[in-house]
Image: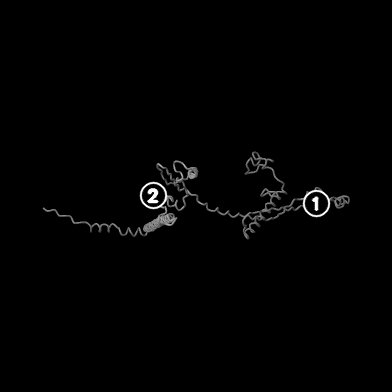
């Protein structure tokens, strides 16, 4: 870069010292836009892309994309490549040169003509697929199992009611039960009994309160003696009485839950009303502090009025007896 001293220019701009060489290189004027720095081809490609995106946006606005539909729009733009610069013009009087030009291949002649080249660009958009349907609600698994164990022996035995969620323990009990009912030993094992059944959601709901069924909830066990069929009761009557009792307990729990929810909602309403009342009271007190009201209040409490009020309340002094 030639040194050129001009007023107002820094030394680095004058000499180019310190400026990266890439910034000092210029692209050809015929193939570049000096404003954007893009070649005419790049400029045409950007124009085609803009047109395609505008056409796609208008199409999607007129008809929305559905599901996983893909829609595309294409647009084009042209740019000009300047022809080869003429080094020497033909002398029309030179018949030999004119004949040579006429007989020259067309490809050589086209080199001196400007060429308009088309550039195509495509814009695409894909619709958002609908969300997958929610999975079906899983069937709640029983949290535990009612367990009944009865051991009968000639010299005594025992019976127990309880819960278990240990599959290995229950499987072991089932194996022992199968052995006891198929073999006869000193323990009169054929009368032994080990059985279990999963708890139902209703039973778990009642047991969660901890207020029914006695200690450990054994009173609600389907194997409890209180639910055995009575003498004059049809077969299965004990199970029917137990189901009625469970329904009654569940209704009682639901009523208590609804009552608690109503009390909670009423408390929230009272709290909200108290807040609103306080806001209104604060707003009234703030309005009373306006300059006009302050002057009005001050006029009611002037020094003269204070002295008069003091004189009215002052009691006469007691006279001292001589």
Q: Say few, some or many: other residues with alpha carbon within 10 Å of mark 1 (under 14 / 14 to 19 / 20 or more).
A: few
Q: In terms of depth relative to the viewer, which is nearer, 19 or 203?
A: 203
Q: In which quarter of the image is the N terminus?
A: top right
Q: In terms of depth relative to the viewer, which is nearer, 142 or 104?
A: 142
* Residue at the extreme top: 17
Taking the image as shown, residue 120 lies to the left or right of residue 175, namely right
Q: In terms of depth relative to the viewer, which is nearer, 254 or 189?
A: 189
Q: Image quadrant of residue 129?
A: bottom right
Mark identifier at residue 320: none
Taking the image as shown, residue 277 lies to the left or right of residue 121, namely left
Q: Is mark 1 on a helix, strand or loop?
A: helix
Q: What residue is rendered at 39% in x and 49% in y? A: 214
Q: Which badge, 1 or 2, is on the more N-terminal residue?
A: 1
From the top left corner, tell me how far across and down residue 142 is, in percent.
Answer: 48, 49
From the top left corner, tell me how far across and down residue 277 is, in percent.
Answer: 38, 58
Q: What residue is rendered at 80% in x and 51% in y? A: 110
Q: Say few, some or many: other residues with alpha carbon within 10 Å of mark 2 (under 14 / 14 to 19 / 20 or more).
A: few
* Residue at the extreme left: 322
* Residue at the extreme right: 96
Which residue does the numbered mark 1 point to in the structure image? 110
Distance in Å between CA atoms under marks 1 and 2 = 106 Å
Residue 247 appears in the figure = no
Q: What element carries label 2?
A: loop
From the top left corner, tell me how far across and down residue 86 is, in percent.
Answer: 80, 49
From the top left corner, tell me how far across and down residue 146 is, in percent.
Answer: 45, 48
Which residue does the numbered mark 2 point to in the structure image? 214
């Amino acid at each position: 870069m030639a040194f050129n001293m001009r007023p107002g220019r820094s030394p680095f701009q004058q000499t180019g010292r310190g400026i990266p060489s890439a910034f000092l290189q210029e692209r050809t004027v015929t193939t570049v836009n000096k404003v954007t720095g893009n070649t005419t081809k790049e400029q045409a490609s950007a124009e085609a892309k803009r047109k395609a995106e505008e056409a796609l946006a208008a199409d999607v606005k007129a008809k929305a994309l559905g599901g996983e539909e893909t829609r595309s729009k294409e647009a084009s733009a042209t740019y000009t490549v300047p022809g080869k610069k003429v080094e020497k013009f033909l002398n029309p009087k030179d018949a030999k040169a004119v004949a040579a030009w006429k007989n020259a291949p067309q490809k050589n002649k086209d080199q001196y003509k400007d060429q308009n080249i088309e550039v195509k660009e495509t814009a695409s958009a894909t619709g958002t697929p609908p969300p997958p349907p929610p999975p079906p609600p899983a069937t709640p698994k029983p949290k535990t199992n009612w367990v009944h164990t009865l051991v009968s022996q000639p010299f005594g035995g025992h019976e127990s009611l309880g819960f278990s969620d240990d599959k290995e323990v229950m499987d072991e009990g089932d194996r022992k039960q199968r052995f006891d009912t198929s073999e006869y030993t000193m323990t009169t094992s054929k009368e032994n009994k080990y059985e279990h059944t999963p708890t139902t959601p209703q039973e778990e709901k009642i047991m969660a309160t901890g207020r029914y069924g006695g200690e450990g909830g054994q009173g609600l066990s389907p194997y409890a003696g209180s639910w055995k069929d009575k003498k004059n009761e049809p077969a299965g009557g004990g199970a029917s009485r137990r189901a009625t009792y469970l329904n009654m307990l569940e209704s009682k729990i639901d009523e208590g839950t609804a009552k608690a929810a109503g009390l909670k909602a009423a408390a929230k309403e009272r709290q909200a009303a108290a807040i609103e009342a306080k806001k209104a009271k604060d707003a009234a007190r703030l309005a009373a502090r306006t300059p006009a009201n302050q002057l009005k209040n001050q006029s009611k409490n002037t020094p003269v009025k204070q002295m008069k009020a003091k004189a009215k309340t002052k009691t006469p002094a007691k006279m001292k007896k001589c």
